[in-house]
Amino acid sequence: MDVVDLFLTVGFWAATVRMATPLIFGTLGELICERAGVLNLGIEGIMTIGAMSAWMWVYQGGDLWTATLFAAMVGASFGLLHAGFSVYMGLSQHVTGIGITLLASSLSYFVFRIMLPGVTTPPKIEPFAPLPIPLLADIPVLGPALFIQSPLTYIALSLVGVVAYILYRTPVGLAVRMVGENPMAVEAQGIDVFAVRTGAVAVGSALMAVGGAFLTISVFDAFYFQMINGRGWICVALVIFASWRPGKALLGAFLFAAFDALQIRVQQASSSLIPYQFYLMMPYLLSIVALIVMSRRAAYPKALLVPFRRGER
Amino acid sequence: MTTPVLRLDGITKRFGPLVANDDISLDLGSGEVLALLGENGAGKTTLMNILFGHYVADAGRIEVFGQPLPHGSPAASIAAGIGMVHQHFTLADNLTVLDNVMLGTESLWAPRQRRAEARDRLTALERDFGLAVDPNATIGSLAVGQRQRVEILKALYRDAKILILDEPTAVLTPQETDSLFDTLRRMVARGLSVIFISHKLNEVMAIADRIAVLRQGAVVASFDKDATSREQLASAMVGRTLAEPKRTPLSAGGPVLEIKAAGLSRRHGGQRLDNVDLTVREQEIIGIAGVSGNGQSALADLISGLVMPETGSLRMLGEPVRRAGPAAMVERGVGRVPEDRHSTGVVGDMTVRENLILEDYRRRPFSRFGLLGFSAIATWTDRLIDSFDIRCSSAAVPVRSLSGGNMQKLILARVLAREPKLILANQPTRGLDVGAIAYVHEKLFEARARGAGIVLISEDLEELLALSDRIAVIYQGRLSEPQPVENVTLTDLGLSMSGHGAFDRGADQSHAA
């Protein structure tokens, strides 16, 4: 297979959009947290527990949509936990976030083991089927790539617009951006800084969890250990790549997913001279390069990582 | 006096053992400007933060228009018609003026912002009160005076009837201060009431109807403006009459520091330097006036050896300085009193003793064979603590527990004990009370009499006029020719600081002569 041909195949583009979906959820979630001034390194763990809880919900007989909602709620509660430590108690956001990741991942594996003891091969569920959009799906190449996808992918794509609208066009979005810039300004206007930050972290974490859920109830049909595989960390990098803007976050997610999709195909197509690990490495390497190029002049939220304490002198 | 729009009754607030506000009662009449006068740490800002709901008072009550105000809720204070212009602006730099003004004025759950209406309302307010700012400009692109206008507009936009201004003139040029006072008079004419917090006597006398003096957390006196004098206010504020050290005439000696045509490009977002010439001689104090951010930090970095000029030259005691290095500059005889005591002057978590030998710890007898000589250090630092009257419970307490005045004494002790040939004093009295200011001035005069050349960078024009032998103005990285202080007036300084080169013309004439 020629590399040029590759870009023309529907399969490549469809895979790119599919692989971008969890990254879009995760990046938007992280972006909302960081816009409010809270770094959420719990993302890797929150995606894991989102993946596990959605899958488990379906496996126990729930339907796919309530599973998505359940994952979001589990994610939001871990977000609240993170906010409790980092917003209300003003503890280090790095340490708290990594703690949340360790807790949520371990808890996912623990619950999985407890509920399914003695299982060697992961059991399967019936995941979301691709939902072709009438008419649009008939467009050559673009149709199958964009419009024969999981319903969750459509939600991810439309969320980009929704998040951008909320951030830039609504009073609550202004309050979120402002707590990330100067919490004192928000306090001085009579708005509760803690409430705004906590809300943003909860909503952001819910989105992350849905990103994880997408993997178990849409792409795959089972829950594996280590299945998030660093996607959460990639989202943290993509937020910087995106300069904290939802539109650029979409671009970044597509770019990374395209590298990833390409990597798989090149790996299959090429000879065995180059070890496959090299191809596995490529998306990450290219992301780092893109990050360096794109984020040199990124204006990060001024109050990111800065805890706010009321009545402090 | 008319009926009070605001009444504070028995407000008390403690921070640990410190009583910041002690049973304070005040009234504010409609259409009145009440000045709260007091030194730093007198409790002015604390009181206003209680009024605005940032802090909760331990005791006392507040009534606004006859209604009791709930404690600890900025939202309730805003709803009651109180607006506050904070000393440190509460604005978000990356957002626009309109965003900053609109925040909190709409229900958070409204589906969209009504930006067009808000913009119209804001422009109308700007017109009414003479506070022109572009609603679409980002805060970061505005000058300090304009940012303050945004703060005032925020309060007006929310229909404030009582405006509190906390040290509003600290960051303004004299002309900007005049324009602020015009705005305040317009507001009062429309029936608003103003609380004006300051420690500057001339401003208080210029704008206030009534003056309440705070000292150590209590209201010690209250005056009608027409029935008091600067002297009376000053002694009420300090609690004793204070002798200001005076400059004695001395003739300047040979050059200590010579900066020739020095240029520095913009870095770290700071102001560049453009072709700066400056010669400092023995026994003279050169004052550098300017609005903050016009290149003072770059000049200070240059003199302290943190950077080298990219063009031009720098000579210390006649010898060219070719390589950057603060330690080398200290060895050459430069003493540095940095602008920000807390971040660059001391290491807050280290002890008084350790901070006192920060510039000397590598030398004998403080360090021998790579080990600190504790007894030598203790003897030396105890002597400094004694002779500079640094008030601390022990030499082993961390420096951050010291008051600003004592921290500055520590820095002066460290610097002056080396008998530097050149002293860079960058904002040496910022944030200090009147007593500590007098102390710093006295020490600088002593160093000058001993033969040191001093570069005094300050935003306090009265301080510059009182201390300097010659004064130069820095504006957008350009330094004017220093003028003898006798030929300089406050008005000239103010104009040059805002770029209306009254001073530069003077400089040009002296070049021509």
Image (tube, rainbow, N blue to C red):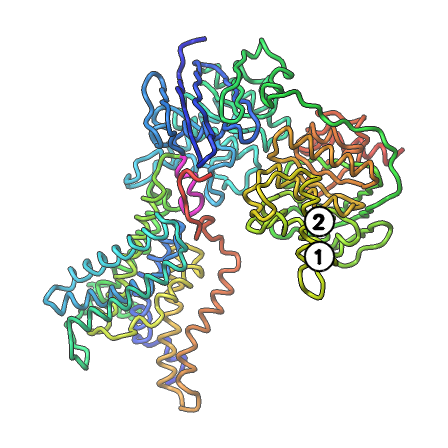
**Residue topped by disc 1:** B366
- Report x, y in % for residue B386: 68, 40
Question: Quadrant of residue A256 in the image?
Answer: bottom left
Is A182 contained in the magenta span?
yes
Q: Name which residue lies at 55% across and 25% down.
A: B38
Q: Is residue B450 above or below residue B127?
A: below
- Neighbor class of circle 1 (other Cα within 10 Å; few <14, some 14-19, many 20+) is some
Q: Is residue A263 above or below residue B151?
A: below
Q: Which of marks 2 and 1 is nearer the N terminus?
A: 1
Real-space Cα separation, disc 2 to disc 1, in angstroms = 9 Å
- Report x, y in % for residue A120: 18, 82
- Evaluate if marks 2 and 1 touch, with contact meaning CB atoms under 8 Å apart: yes
Of all chains, the one bearing label 2 is B
Kind of residue at disc 1: Phe
Kind of residue at disc 2: Trp
Q: Name which residue lies at 86% across and 44% down.
A: B255
**Residue topped by disc 2:** B380
- Report x, y in % for residue B447: 78, 39
